Image (spheres, rainbow, N blue to C red):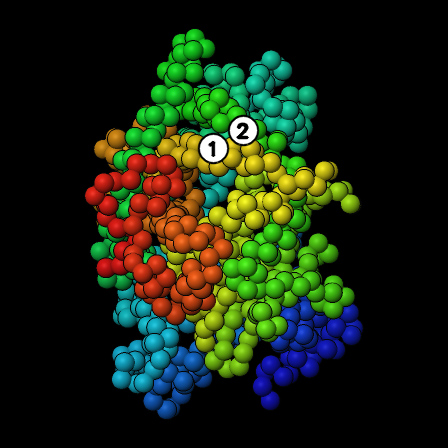
Amino acid sequence: MSLKTLIAGAAVAASLAGATAAAVDNSAAPANPLLAPWTGPYGGVPAFDKAKVEYLKPALEAGMAEALAEIDRIAANPEPATFENTIAALERSGRTLDRVSTVYGIYSSTLNDEAVQAVEREMAPKLAAFSDQITQNEALFKRIAAVYETREKAGLTPEEQRLAWLRYTNFVRSGAKLDAQAKQRLSEINQQLAGLYTKFGQNVLADENNEQLVIENEADLAGLPGAVRAGAAQVAESRGQKGQWVIANTRSSVEPFLTYSDRRELREKVWRMFVNRGDNGGATDNNTIITEILQLRAERAKLLGYETHAHWRLENTMAKNPQRAMELMEAVWTPAVGRVREEVADMQAIADKESAGIKIEPWDYRYYAEKVRKAKYDLDETEITPYMQLENLREGMFYMAQQVFGFHFKPVDPAKLAVYHPDVRVWEVNDPKGNLVGLWYFDPYARKGKRSGAWMNAYRAQERFDGDVKTIVSNNSNFVKGSPGEPVLISWKDAETLFHEFGHALHGLSSNVNYPTLAGTRVARDYVEFPSQLLEHWLSTPEILNRYALHYQTGKPIPQALVDKIKNADRFNQGFDTVEYLSSALIDMKLHLAGDQKIDPDKFERETLTALGMPTEIVMRHRTPQFMHVFSGDGYSAGYYSYLWSDTLTADAWEAFTEASGPWDKAVAKQLIDNVFSVGNTIDPADGYRSFRGRDAGIAALMRKRGFPVPAAAAPAAAKSK
Ligand SMILES: [Zn+2]
């Protein structure tokens, strides 16, 4: 009897009993519905109606045990290693854990309470140890290596060869080739780093929580719009300072204050408080931690056979090596700095006209930029919002998906499909012939226990090697739910984000591959934002705006004059945005190219920025002592450049449409779907892009998009393959 059958049988009993935690713990054969295969329509869907927090831990543990047993069987197979009995067998393994992890992920990100946090604290180290156990399985690695080494002679398809390559490389990159002593050292380093990452993040959080600007006199609120004042009053009240105003030390509080406050000395105070997070000496200072992290990362890279941490991190990306990422950043840096000079001149002119008697400093930038925006573009956000109804824009996205991808969205009857929260709605997605493509779950509203921001999540990847499995994807955001019957109005920026996340969903839905490890959005880090950033462009097309950006009271489409203003202001402040971002990305890369020298982060940052010619009116978006992307985990270390890399592709890909008949050009759409959206990670992204565009992406389109001068001798092609 297989483990799955046993568990599935038991799950029925548990659901009939409406099992409580006690009932689960007491039962001799644990009946845990999370372990059961998904059943029902659409090839099975998550049984959210049966899920409970108390099932998570035992289900994760059972899932890990089952996966390890499966892997041991693959490793111990007496037959010679083949693609089928090793790589395909690995693709088949761990299915219970995949399903449980999906539900666990949904609880962590959207239903997070004390109980879920307790599970997270307990399970995070166990899940990490689990993955170490797999990569350190020597018998398994030998079999993977054998398949990889004979991949070209074994009659494998290109997709199978790539999967063998990916499995092999991931093992090697995690230290599978090291001897026992080196493996031991590697796992010490990993554990030490994990501790330092946690401490780094906690220090930043402590400085954000413990420092604030308290305003006692209403006169000191001069310039702040009503909403910002109300927010500051609310923060004060929540911190026991009712009747005063508090500017918290977080981006969402600080940036509006710097944009609108007329009190220059307070702007400077707030600015200094924010940019010095993690850099204040004392218990929460991150400088020593950064030095240690960088040295451990350098040691680990050497141990694994790489020149630097950056070389290790970039190996499997589209850029492939740090040098090519640096070339792109440097090509954009100089014109962006040039644009900053122009922006500063515009701002200085306004300050001089007002007889402010100042020279623009970093705490003045946002404030005077806002004045320039009003003077030059006459754009007021409050004019746009009444046309931005969430449900209409969602219909607009469906229209886009139908026109460009041939996808038809049809709502699923809530009675027929369980969701994890009543706000969640589900649509089935079909192709023009009526064949099922997948499911799209939509969870739009903010609530307690849901993480901030917006994201896409694939509940189940598309695959076909063992039968046709359709994908399940979801989009999540944090809009404020209106009163019943009232439309939810969102900002232009939020509408862009909505389209962005839908781009990730379409990337998942378009997937047409055999093996789940290569499906949908499971692509390189510097490639994954390209399809989503591209989708943002359709929002401002006349077809979407005229049909779907309708005034919530009059039903009239957004006036062309307003659309023109939005378009005009599109390139506004791009010097600031680019330099603020790029200085952080350059420091990230240079820190990780520096090797094992002992780095003093403040000194390194200061000297590197001086050498780069950083404009004194701007500070890095994330200074080193607070750079969470880079030091609270490995994820975006030596990887902050990825956003620019993806945007280079995005800008160039959009021009493929504008060079043809426009955003709705069927031939360009087909090329895009065939070579980008549907192929997942079955081909090298650079090859996929080249097949789509007929050439590599240069930086000219990016420069046009940002309003920078296009270099005459079409500079280093950014996204060129080696
Ligand atoms: Zn994204």
Write down the quadrant of residue 341 in the picture. top left
Q: Disc 1 vs disc 2: Cβ atoms closer than 8 Å?
A: yes
As drawn, is 380 to the left or to the right of 338? right
Residue 678 position within the rendered picture, expressed as x and y whole percent measured from the top left: 45, 67
As helix, strand or loop, the secondary structure at mark 1 comes to helix
Q: Which residue is at 56% across, 18% downward?
A: 223
* Rendered residue at 56%/39% (across/down): 492
Q: Tell me the amino acid under the disc marked 2.
A: Leu
Q: Mark 2 near ligand 1 (CB under 8 Å)?
A: no
For the residues labelled 1 and 2, the Cα–Cα distance comes to 8 Å
The residue depicted at 35 percent of the width and 41 percent of the height is 704
| Residue, disc 2 | 379
> Which corner quadrant holds the C terminus?
bottom left
Q: Is residue 125 left or right of residue 549?
A: left
Q: Is residue 108 visible?
A: no
Type of amino acid at the residue the image marks with label 1: Ala
| 91 displayed left or right of 696 | right
Q: From this viewpoint, which residue is outermost toward the bottom?
A: 79
Tell me the quadrant of the picture where the N terminus can be found.
Answer: bottom right
Where does the image place residue 5, in percent across and percent down from the top left? 63, 84
Local packing at callout 1 (Cα closer than 10 Å; few below 14, some 14-19, many 20+) is some
Residue ranking furthest to the front: 661
Residue on which disc 1 sits: 569
Q: Answer yes or no: is residue 86 visible.
A: yes
Q: For residue 297, which numbered disc appears in the image?
A: none
Q: Percent position (x, y) of residue 454?
A: 56, 49
Percent x, y of residue 37: 62, 76
Marked residue nearer the N-terminal end (1 or 2): 2
Q: Would you say the beta carbon of the disc 1 residue lies within 8 angstroms of ligand 1?
A: no
Q: Secondary structure at mark 2?
A: loop
Residue at x-position 45% and y-position 76%: 514
Q: Nearer the viewer, residue 381 or 118?
A: 381
